Each structure stands twice: as structure tokens, then as C-alpha cells.
């Protein structure tokens, strides 16, 4: 085996790596909690939704890509339902109205937002102060 590059120093590591369980959870809606990690240009939300939680229809400037990691939900997009299950990815352009009904099994998902959402960044800052 050829020689590998040197490992990053702890300081270098800490600038680039986040262990998401250490990031405070933010309540997005009743029954919907998220760990949020963001850079200047992109936001990652690791979302856990309780069984039968509801996400009211809303809009935001950010584009959104959501991947269901576990469980199921019916995503509302412009007044129509899209049944999502483990492994499904849905793409939501900027300012498209969407929301969701979480099914009895709950739902874990990853959301990616570009650009980062200011409202979620504000919730994250509040959670860090607690």
C-alpha cells in the first residue's frame, strides 16, 4: 500500500467535521425535530417526525431535496399527495407550496436546502442558546 496523506490536526478537523447528534435539535413543527447543519451556501436538515405529525403547507425561496431514510409520509405538493417511503427522493423547486402528513410509522428524512433558510438558521441559534 502506498503512503497515505497525513491526518488533519484536531483544529483542522474541528473546522470541517460535525457529529450531527451533537448539534442541538430544533422543533420545526409539533412532532417534527431536526438537527441542522449549514454552510454559507447549503443547509442540511436531519429530520425525525413522530407518527401522525403534520407539516402545514408552506413555501420558501430555497430549493429543497428530501430523501426518506425510514418510515413513510404523504407529501403535499401544490394540492396533490405524493406517497413517499424509504429510499424515495422528492425535489421541490423554489416557492412551490408543500407540506406533509406523516404516517403511523413516523418518518426520518434528510432535507437539503439551497440557499440555507434564514428562518431555520434563527431556530438553530435559539436552540444553541438553551
Image (cartoon, helix red, strand yellow):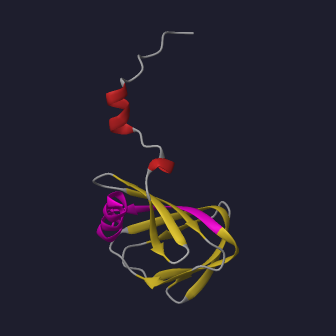
Q: Is residue 115 magenta?
A: yes
Magenta span covers which residues? 107-130
What x and y, as percent, mark residue 93? 41, 72
Q: Residue furthest right?
A: 105
- Write the residue at 63% across / 68% down: 107
User: Which of the two residues, 89 or 48, is positioned nearer the viewer here?
Assistant: 48
Q: Quadrant of the C terminus?
A: bottom left
Residue name at image x 62 percent, y 72 percent: 50
Q: Give 43 or 94, whichever is nearer the viewer.
A: 43
Report if residue 29 is visible in the image: yes
Residue at 57 percent of width and 87 percent of height: 80
Residue 68 placement: quadrant: bottom right
Look at the picture and state if 81 lies above or below 14.
Answer: below
As drawn, which residue projects farthest toward the top?
2
Quadrant housing residue 14: top left
In the rendered image, the quadrant that contains the N terminus is top right
Q: Nearer the viewer, residue 59 or 54?
A: 54
Q: Residue at x 47, y 43 (%)?
A: 19
* Up-down relation of residue 45 to residue 6 (above or below): below
The stretch drawn in magenta includes residue 85: no
Q: Measured along the vertical axis of the image, is residue 110 above or below residue 51? A: above
Q: Is residue 75 visible?
A: no
Residue located farthest toward the front when viewing the structure as drawn: 130
Please name whichever residue, 13 or 31, is drawn nearer the observer in this view of the structure.
31
Q: Position of residue 128 (x, y in %)?
A: 35, 57
Q: Position of residue 34 (x, y in %)?
A: 48, 63
Tally of marks: 0
Residue 46 screen position, x and y as percent: 51, 58
Quadrant of the rendered image containing residue 109: bottom right
Amino acid at each position: 500500500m502506498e503512503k497515505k496523506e497525513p491526518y488533519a490536526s484536531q483544529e483542522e478537523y474541528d473546522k470541517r467535521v460535525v457529529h450531527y447528534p451533537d448539534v442541538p435539535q430544533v422543533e420545526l413543527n409539533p412532532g417534527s425535530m431536526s438537527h441542522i447543519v449549514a454552510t454559507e451556501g447549503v443547509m442540511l436538515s436531519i429530520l425525525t417526525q413522530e407518527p401522525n405529525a403534520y407539516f402545514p403547507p408552506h413555501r420558501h425561496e430555497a430549493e429543497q431535496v428530501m430523501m426518506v431514510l425510514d418510515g413513510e409520509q404523504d407529501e403535499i405538493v401544490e394540492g396533490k399527495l405524493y406517497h413517499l417511503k424509504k429510499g424515495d427522493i422528492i425535489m421541490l423547486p423554489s416557492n412551490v407550496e408543500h407540506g406533509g402528513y406523516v404516517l403511523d410509522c413516523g418518518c426520518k428524512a434528510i432535507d437539503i436546502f439551497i440557499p440555507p433558510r434564514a428562518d431555520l438558521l434563527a431556530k438553530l441559534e435559539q436552540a444553541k442558546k438553551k
